[in-house]
Amino acid sequence: MAVALLWVHVSPNTTDLLYCGFHDSSSSRSLYLRPSFEGKLKRTKPNWSSTSTCSLNQCLKFSCLGESENNNTRNIKFPVLSSLVANPGGEIVVSSEEMVYNVVLKQAALVKRQLRTSEVNMDVKPDLVVPGTLSLMNEAYDRCKEVCAEYAKTFYLGTLLMTPERRRAIWAIYVWCRRTDELVDGPNSSHITPAALDRWESRLEDLFAGRPYDMLDAALSDTVTKFPVDIQPFKDMIEGMRLDLRKSRYKNFDELYLYCYYVAGTVGLMSVPVMGISPESQAPTEKVYNSALALGIANQLTNILRDVGEDARRGRVYLPQDELSQAGLSDEDIFAGRVTDNWRNFMKKQIKRARMFFDESENGVTELSSASRWPVLASLLLYRQILDEIEANDYDNFTKRAYVSKAKKILALPVAYARSVISPLRASGLMKA
C-alpha cells in the first residue's frame, strides 16, 4: 500500500512557513513546496502559507535560465534545406535541423516507453491522496488558468476545447514559457544576466525533481509527473533566452532555424505529450513530433515577419543576413523602413518558407488525439492568416502590424473543426487518393 506523508517546516524564530512537502512511499519521491512572499497580484488568491502570491514579474526577481545536448549524427529529411557545413578547421559540422532532431528522437522514445509501461501497469491501484493537497494543486492550476486567460485570450479559448486534465497541463506549460520569455522581454529584462538564466535553469531542474519554488512551478511539477514530458525542450528554451542576451543578428537561415527552435519549436515538443497521439494513428511517433516542431518554427517565423519594424526599433534584425544581402538589402534599409521592390521580393520568399513549415505541421495534426485536433488546427489556421495580412499590407511590416480580424477568427473555427473530425486512418486514405 502506498503511503504519503505531509510535513511542514516553520522558521524557529517566527511563524513563517519555510516549506512544506509530501513523500510518496510507493515511488520514494518527495515534493517540496516553498512559498513566495513577493507582493500581491490582481485577483490574488491565498498562497501555500495563506499569504499573498507573487505576480509574474515579481516571481522573476529571484528567477532565472541551460545547456542543450545537441549532438545528433543521424541524417533525416527536414522541411529546411540547410546542409552540412565545414568550420574554419575543415571539420564537418551538422546542421541545426539535425541537432534538433536528436531532441525529437529523445522525446518520442520517452512517449513510447510510457505507453509500454501503461500497458504493463494497467491493474496498479492509484496512490492515496493526502487530504488538502488536491485543493492546493487545484489552486495552482487555477492561477495558471488566470494568467493564460489574461495574457493569451485566443490561445486560452482554444484550450477550453481540450479535456480538463489536458487543458490544465497546457496552462501550466504556457505559464512557464511566458515567465521564461519575460526574463528577456519583460519589464525587468534590463537586469537579467547569464547568471540569472543559470539560476532559472537550476530552478527548472528542481521543478522536474519535485521541488517547485512557488505555486506556478508546482502546477508544472505536477504536470510532468502525469505526462511523458522531457526536460530538454525546456532547457533549450532557456538557451534561446541566452541567445537574445548576446545575439541580435543571424548570418543565415541555419542559425535562425536553431533560434526559432529554441524559443518556439520547443513548445511543440513540450505540448505533444499532453495533446496525445490518436490510438488510430499509424504514423511513427517521430513524425508527429516533427510536425509539432514545424508548427512552432512556422509560428516563430510568422512572429519575426510580423514584428520586423518593432524589432528594428529595438536594434534587432531576426532575418538571415546572407539572404538580405542577396536581395540587395541591408540593416540600414530595415532601420529606415523602406518598402521597395527588393523588400517585397525578399518578403515573398520569407513568407513562402513560413508557409512551407505550416504545411509540414498540418500533415501531423490529424495524428493527434481527437480532443486536441480542433484547438491545434484553429491555432494553425489563424496564425497562418497573419502572413496573408502582411501581403495585404503590401509587405509594410515596418509601420503596419498585421493582425487577423475578429470576424476572420470566428470564420476559421468551423473550418478547423471540419478538418479535426477526420481520423488519422481516413486522412491517410485521402492523401493516398
Image: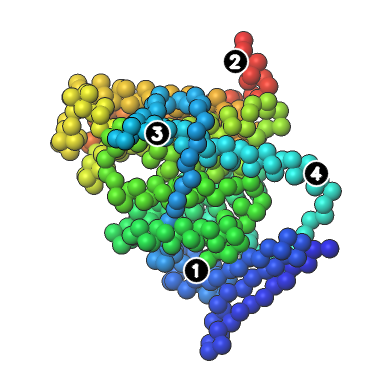
- Residue identifier under label 2: 431
CA distance separating discs 1 and 3: 47 Å
- Residue identifier under label 1: 53
Between disc 2 and disc 4, whose residue precedes? 4
Q: Is residue 339 left or right of residue 178?
A: left
- SS label for mark 2: helix
Q: Amino acid at mark 4?
A: Val
- SS label for mark 3: strand
- Residue identifier under label 3: 93
Between disc 3 and disc 2, whose residue precedes? 3
Looking at the image, do the residues carrying marks 1 and 4 touch, with CB atoms under 8 Å apart?
no
Q: Amino acid at mark 3?
A: Val
Crowd class of label 2 (few under 14; some 14 to 19; many from 20; radius 10 Å)? few
- Residue identifier under label 4: 120
The residue sitting at 56% across, 60% down in the picture is 207
CA distance separating discs 3 and 2: 36 Å
Give me the disc on residue 370: none
- SS label for mark 4: helix
Q: Quadrant of the C terminus?
A: top right
The residue sitting at 46% across, 67% down in the picture is 54
**In the figure, residue 86 lies in which quadrant?**
top left
Front residue of this view, candidates 300 and 42: 300
- Whole-percent x and y of residue 298? 43, 32
